[in-house]
Image (cartoon, grey):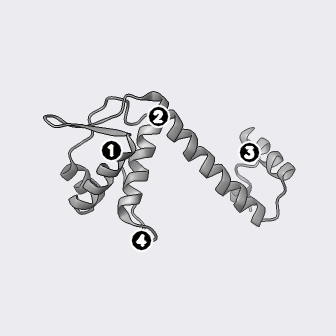
Amino acid sequence: MQWQIRGDRPIYQQLMERLTEEIVSGQLQPGDKVPPVRELAAEAGVNPNTMQRALADLEREGLLHTNRTSGRYVTEDSQMIDSVREKIAADRIAEFLAGMSLLGYNEQQIEALLRKHSAGEGKNDAENK
């Protein structure tokens, strides 16, 4: 895992987002054991208490659960994982659309750009300038 912590938001939130992305993307599979707090904290370069807070919040949300004798595990509730994945996607789409609107694009222009770029055209436009 490569952690990129920025100073613009609380660290524990960034840790939660990163771990959530790993769960919904399948990098951490349902039922997988999560590495210990100290190991994750050292890897991310953060205080173990901050990592503990992020993991505890993910437990409250239901994405992780603790087995007192063997550690934390990713939920096996695939519907919950799918629901979280869909919410993240919807949030990112809303951000993208808002940003494109600020650039002056309307819905049809955005759709045309998406089609162009998903077909592989225009990917190097910025590099060719």
| Residue wearing tag 1 | 59
Foreground tag (3 vs 1)? 1
Horizontal arrangement in the rendering, residue 78 relative to residue 127 (left or right): left
Note whether 8 is above or below 42 in the view shown.
Answer: below
User: Label 2 near label 3: C-beta < 8 Å?
Assistant: no
User: Label 4 near label 3: C-beta < 8 Å?
Assistant: no
Q: CA distance from mark 3 to mark 4?
A: 32 Å
Task: Give the residue type at disc 4.
Answer: Gly
Q: Indicate the position of residue 129 as horizontal and vertical percent values.
A: 74, 62
Secondary structure, mark 1, is: helix
How busy is the neighbourhood of tag 3: few (under 14 within 10 Å), some, or many (20 plus)?
few
Q: CA distance from mark 4 to mark 2?
A: 30 Å
Looking at the rendered structure, which numbered label has been put on residue 80? Answer: 2
Looking at the image, which residue sits at the far front?
A: 60
The quarter of the picture where residue 103 lies is: bottom right
Secondary structure, mark 2, is: helix
Dot placed on the residue nearer the N-terminal end, 4 or 1 = 4
User: Label 2 near label 1: C-beta < 8 Å?
Assistant: no
Task: Give the residue type at disc 1.
Answer: Glu
Q: CA distance from mark 4 to mark 1?
A: 25 Å
Dot placed on the residue nearer the N-terminal end, 1 or 2 = 1
Secondary structure, mark 3, is: helix
Q: CA distance from mark 1 to mark 2?
A: 13 Å
